[in-house]
Image (cartoon, grey):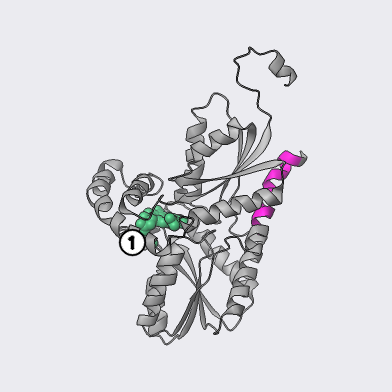
């Protein structure tokens, strides 16, 4: 009991200890690879005004009457192809990343994880950290490139929850790290290692980033520029002059024009132009997920080989690789240093 507790009534909640918590956050994923849970997840995700920037009065009827009646079945099938014994790859890897950070950062800091959509939710984990006495919380969205549809909506969600609290934690947010030497070095080391381990030598390496509506670029979202900068720095750092490297954007959604060139179009175009051996990496994803394991590794392979390609490799994301964990530790320690040493 502290001196403060002694002055409080007996039924008063315990005085918090003031410890430091880290909440790492990724996008989110359904609870099961079945249409029901996928529908629930998509309803939450695609109702986020940061993600679909169409007025709700126009979008919600389309979402409810068309998208949520057609997409869940198709997406559930895709999730079924990549689901693991432990669950959705994105959730499993994010949890493993949090556990590894707990080990690396030690007992002085508590590391937890959450998903922007689905479970475990950001409010749930923020409250759990507060209940356990962590009054300073570092919110770490694991998106190297900033976009309103990813980084900003994580901060919105945390802020919305803080708005409901009488006793708020102090919140710090980890900035995007698209050009951070720790990130570029980790990518170069991990992609270089995977390229060296292939039993063929690719002529082309695609760096495929998740797409966004092109309109967001014109509205000032830095996402496209940050993807291009990551690619340029990574290309320099990879030092493979014989390898043709191209930047592409995947996972188009809806009817609007998205950032180009599209990954699927480039796969077919490269094969059509005579490229026989191709590798693809997804540097914007911190963890393998549906978009890398199904869309790139399964569908991408089909698109390339059906158009005449012969050898294809989809490289893993940083996940829990040594390079990836060392990078995360560097980024988190940098943000925590003000609180620990200050
Ligand atoms: C890495 C950054 C991401 C950006 C930017 C992003 C933008 C964005 N996404 C959609 C629509 C969908 N994305 C879906 C899956 C998905 N998206 C990301 C990351 C980014 N999205 C990840 C990591 C995942 C995988 C989730 C998993 O469970 O493994 C999906 C769901 C799957 C499907 O039905 O195809 C949709 C839908 C939009 C509209 C958008 C930008 C405006
Ligand atoms: Fe997405
Ligand atoms: Fe997809």
Range of magenta residues:
327-340
Report the residue at 66% width, 13% height from top.
8
- Say few, some or many: other residues with alpha carbon within 10 Å of mark 1 (under 14 / 14 to 19 / 20 or more): some
Q: Position of residue 26 (x, y in %)?
A: 51, 51
Whether residue 332 appears in magenta in the rendering, the answer is yes
Whether residue 126 appears in magenta in the rendering, the answer is no
Answer with the quarter of the image where residue 275 lies.
Answer: bottom left
Q: Residue furthest right?
A: 341
Side of 80 relative to 329 (left or right): left
Report the residue at 45% width, 56% height from top.
88
Counting labels gives: 1
Q: Position of residue 71 (x, y in %)?
A: 29, 56
In the rendered view, tell whether residue 158 sits above or below residue 42: above
In the rendered view, tell whether residue 174 sits above or below residue 294: above
Q: Position of residue 100 (x, y in %)?
A: 64, 53
Task: Report the image quarter containing ligand 3.
Answer: bottom left
Residue placed under numbered mark 1 in the picture? 77
Report the residue at 38% width, 84% height from top.
272
């Amino acid at each position: 009991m502290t001196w403060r507790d002694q002055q409080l009534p007996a039924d008063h909640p315990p005085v918090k200890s003031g410890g430091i918590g880290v909440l790492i956050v990724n996008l989110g994923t359904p609870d099961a690879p079945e249409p029901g849970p996928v529908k629930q997840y998509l309803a939450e995700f695609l109702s986020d005004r940061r993600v679909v920037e169409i007025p709700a009065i126009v979008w919600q009827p389309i979402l409810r009457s068309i998208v949520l009646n057609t997409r869940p079945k198709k997406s559930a099938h895709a999730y079924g192809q990549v689901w693991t014994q432990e669950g959705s790859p994105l959730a499993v890897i994010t949890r493993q990343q949090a556990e590894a950070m707990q080990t690396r950062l030690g007992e002085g800091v508590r590391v937890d994880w959450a998903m922007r959509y689905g479970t475990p939710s950001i409010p749930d984990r923020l409250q759990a950290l507060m209940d356990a006495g962590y009054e300073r919380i570092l919110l770490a969205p694991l998106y190297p490139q900033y976009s309103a549809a990813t980084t900003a909506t994580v901060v919105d969600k945390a802020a919305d929850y803080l708005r409901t609290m009488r006793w708020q934690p102090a919140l710090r947010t980890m900035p995007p790290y698209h050009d951070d030497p720790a990130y570029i070095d980790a990518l170069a080391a991990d992609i270089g290692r995977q390229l060296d381990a292939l039993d063929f030598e690719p002529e082309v390496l695609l760096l495929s980033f998740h797409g966004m509506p092109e309109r967001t670029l014109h509205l000032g979202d830095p996402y496209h520029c940050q993807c291009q900068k990551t690619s340029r720095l990574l290309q320099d750092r990879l030092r493979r002059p014989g390898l043709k490297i191209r930047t592409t954007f995947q996972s188009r959604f809806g009817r609007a024009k998205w950032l180009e060139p599209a990954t699927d179009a480039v796969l077919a175009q490269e094969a059509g132009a005579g490229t026989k051996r191709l590798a693809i990496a997804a540097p914007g994803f911190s963890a393998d997920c549906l978009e890398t394991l199904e869309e790139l590794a399964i569908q991408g392979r089909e698109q390339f080989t059906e158009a005449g390609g012969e050898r294809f490799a989809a490289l893993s994301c940083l996940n829990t690789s040594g390079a990836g964990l060392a990078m995360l530790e560097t980024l988190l320690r940098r943000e925590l240093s003000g609180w620990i040493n200050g």
